[in-house]
Image (cartoon, helix red, strand yellow):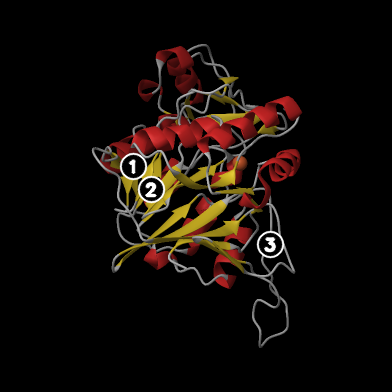
C-alpha cells in the first residue's frame, strides 16, 4: 500500500509528471501495470432491463466503527438482527474478540431459489482487523462470487492487500472485482496528509478480473451497482480529500482514462465521481441499498439505486451515511425529510454516519433507525 507517493514533484501535466517519476522501479512498475491492466480489466456488464430478485439477503458487518455488546438478537417484520456477543470461541479462553475500527467491510449472502451468492463489499482500514473478524465470523473467502470496492478511500481498501496475500490461491480464479471507474485509483490526500492509493498491481497479481462499472451493473447474478451517482438532491456532503491524476511510482490513475479537466498535474478537490453503491431487490419487500460511505450524498445514492432499477420501494438502507460535523441540524433534518419521502422500512446506520444524525433520525423516525455494529448480521426476506 502506498505511503510515499513519489520522490518527485508532480509537474503541470500528467505526461510531465510521469516523466519526472521515470528512471526508477516506479516507472517500470507503472508500465507493467499498464500492460496488465489492458489484459485483465473489463468493462462491467451494463444493467439492461429488470434487476434480479432475491428471496433472502444476509448482510454481515465484518468491519465497522462500533462494537456493541449486551444487545439481544431480535426479529422484526422482514428483518432479523443477529447481534454477536459473549466469547467468540466458547470452549477456549476468551483471547480473541471482534475488533472495531474506522472502516467498513460487509459480507452479503443472497439466495434466489436454490442459488446462493457471496459478495464482499470493501475491506476496512487494516487487514489485521478484517482477517481477525472474518476468522471469528467463519467467513470463507473461497465462496466469494465477486468483490466490490465502493470508492478509493483507505478506510475501505486498506485491508485489501493483506487480505489478498492471506488468501492466495483460495479465491475463485478470475474473481470479478468491481470498482466505479478509473478515478478510484487516483492518489488521494486527506487533511492529515497522504491518504494512499489503491494497489492495482496487487489486484491483478491476485488473478482478479478488474471490472469497471461506471454504469449500473449486475454483480454475481443477484446484486447490482448504482453506477455513477448523480447529484440530484440538495445534498452537499463533506469532501475533505483531494486527488491527483497520473501514475506515481506504480500507483495512481491513468491520465488517458480520466477526464481532461481533472488532469491538472496538481491535487484537486475529490468529487467521488467513481463512488458506487451495491444493491439488492428483495422479493415482496423492495430494495436494500448498501451505501458504504455516501460521499456523493446518501439520498443521492438511494435515488440512484431507485433510478437504476426502476423500483420505487426501498426496504432498507445500510452502511455509512456520512452526515457528519460541521454539517449541522438543518442539514441533518433536511436529510431526514428526504428519507421520510422515500419511506424505507429500515435505516441501518454504521461507519461514518455521524452520532447527531443517529440521534435526530431516531427521534424523528423511531425504531426503524437501527445501529450497525461489528459482527451484526441483518437478514432480510424470509424470517
Ligand atoms: Fe468511509
Say if residue 319 shows up in the picture. yes
State how far apart marks 3 and 1 are (Cα).
30 Å
Q: Is residue 38 left or right of residue 74?
A: left
Q: Secondary structure at mark 2?
A: strand
Are the residues tagged 1 and 2 within 8 Å (C-beta)? yes
Is the residue under label 1 in contact with that under label 3 (CB below 8 Å)?
Answer: no
Which circle marks residue 211 in the picture?
Answer: 1
Residue 137, by quadrant, is bottom right
The N terminus, quarter of image: top right
Secondary structure under tag 3 reads loop
Number of residue marks: 3
Question: Which quadrant of the structure image shows residue 188?
Answer: top right
Q: Give the residue at mark 2.
A: 177
**Spot occupied by residue 284 in the image (x, y as percentages of width and height):** 38, 54
- How many neighbours does mark 1 have within 10 angstroms: few (below 14), some (14-19), or many (20 or more)? many
Give the label on residue 284, or none: none
Q: Is residue 354 visible?
A: no
Which residue carries the number 3 mark? 99
- Mark 2, residues whose alpha carbon is within 10 Å: few (<14), some, or many (≥20)? many
The span from disc 2 to disc 3 (Cα, nearest Å) is: 25 Å
Ligand 1's quadrant: top right
Q: Nearer the viewer, residue 259 or 368?
A: 368
Q: Is the residue at mark 2 in contact range of ligand 1, meaning its CB lies under 8 Å from it?
A: no
**Rendered position, 341 above or below 40:** above
Residue ID at (45%, 25%): 230
Q: Position of residue 300 (x, y in %)?
A: 50, 30
Above-or-below relation of 352 to 108: above
User: Alpha-carbon distance for marks 1 and 2?
Assistant: 6 Å
Nearer to us in this view, 157 or 143: 143
Q: Position of residue 264 (x, y in %)?
A: 50, 13
Which residue is at a point 64% across and 80% down the rendered structure image?
Answer: 89
Amino acid at each position: 500500500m502506498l505511503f510515499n507517493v513519489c520522490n518527485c514533484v508532480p509537474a503541470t501535466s500528467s505526461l510531465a509528471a510521469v516523466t519526472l517519476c521515470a528512471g526508477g522501479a516506479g516507472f517500470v512498475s507503472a508500465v507493467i501495470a499498464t500492460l496488465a491492466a489492458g489484459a485483465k480489466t473489463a468493462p462491467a456488464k451494463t444493467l439492461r432491463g429488470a434487476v434480479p430478485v432475491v428471496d433472502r439477503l444476509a448482510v454481515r458487518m465484518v468491519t465497522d466503527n462500533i462494537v456493541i455488546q449486551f444487545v439481544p438478537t431480535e426479529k422484526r417484520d422482514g428483518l432479523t438482527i443477529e447481534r454477536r456477543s459473549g466469547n467468540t470461541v466458547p470452549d477456549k479462553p476468551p483471547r480473541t474478540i471482534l475488533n472495531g475500527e474506522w472502516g467498513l467491510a460487509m459480507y452479503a449472502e443472497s439466495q434466489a431459489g436454490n442459488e446462493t451468492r457471496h459478495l464482499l463489499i470493501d475491506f476496512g482500514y487494516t487487514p489485521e482487523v478484517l482477517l481477525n473478524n472474518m476468522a471469528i465470523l467463519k467467513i470463507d473467502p473461497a465462496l466469494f462470487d465477486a468483490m466490490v470496492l465502493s470508492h478509493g478511500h483507505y478506510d475501505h481498501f486498506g485491508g485489501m492487500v493483506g487480505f489478498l496475500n492471506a488468501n492466495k490461491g483460495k479465491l475463485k480464479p478470475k474473481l470479478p472485482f468491481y470498482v466505479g471507474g478509473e478515478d478510484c485509483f487516483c492518489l488521494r490526500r486527506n487533511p492529515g496528509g497522504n491518504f494512499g492509493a489503491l494497489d492495482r498491481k496487487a489486484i491483478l497479481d491476485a488473478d482478479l478480473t478488474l471490472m469497471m462499472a461506471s454504469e449500473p451493473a449486475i454483480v454475481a447474478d443477484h446484486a447490482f451497482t448504482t453506477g455513477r451517482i448523480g447529484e440530484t438532491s440538495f445534498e452537499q456532503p463533506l469532501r475533505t480529500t483531494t486527488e491527483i491524476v497520473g501514475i506515481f511510482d506504480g500507483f495512481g490513475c491513468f491520465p488517458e482514462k480520466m477526464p481532461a479537466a481533472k488532469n491538472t498535474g496538481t491535487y484537486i478537490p475529490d468529487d467521488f465521481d467513481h463512488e458506487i453503491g451495491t444493491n439488492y431487490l428483495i422479493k415482496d419487500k423492495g430494495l436494500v441499498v448498501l451505501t458504504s460511505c455516501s460521499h456523493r450524498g446518501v439520498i443521492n445514492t438511494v435515488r440512484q439505486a431507485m433510478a437504476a432499477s426502476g423500483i420505487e420501494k426501498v426496504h432498507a438502507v445500510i452502511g455509512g451515511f456520512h452526515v457528519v460535523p460541521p454539517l449541522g441540524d438543518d442539514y441533518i433534518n433536511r436529510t431526514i425529510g428526504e428519507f421520510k419521502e422515500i419511506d424505507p422500512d429500515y435505516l441501518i446506520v454504521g461507519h461514518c454516519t455521524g452520532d447527531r444524525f443517529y440521534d435526530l433520525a431516531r427521534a424523528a423516525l423511531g425504531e426503524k433507525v437501527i445501529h450497525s455494529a461489528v459482527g451484526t448480521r441483518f437478514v432480510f426476506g424470509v424470517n
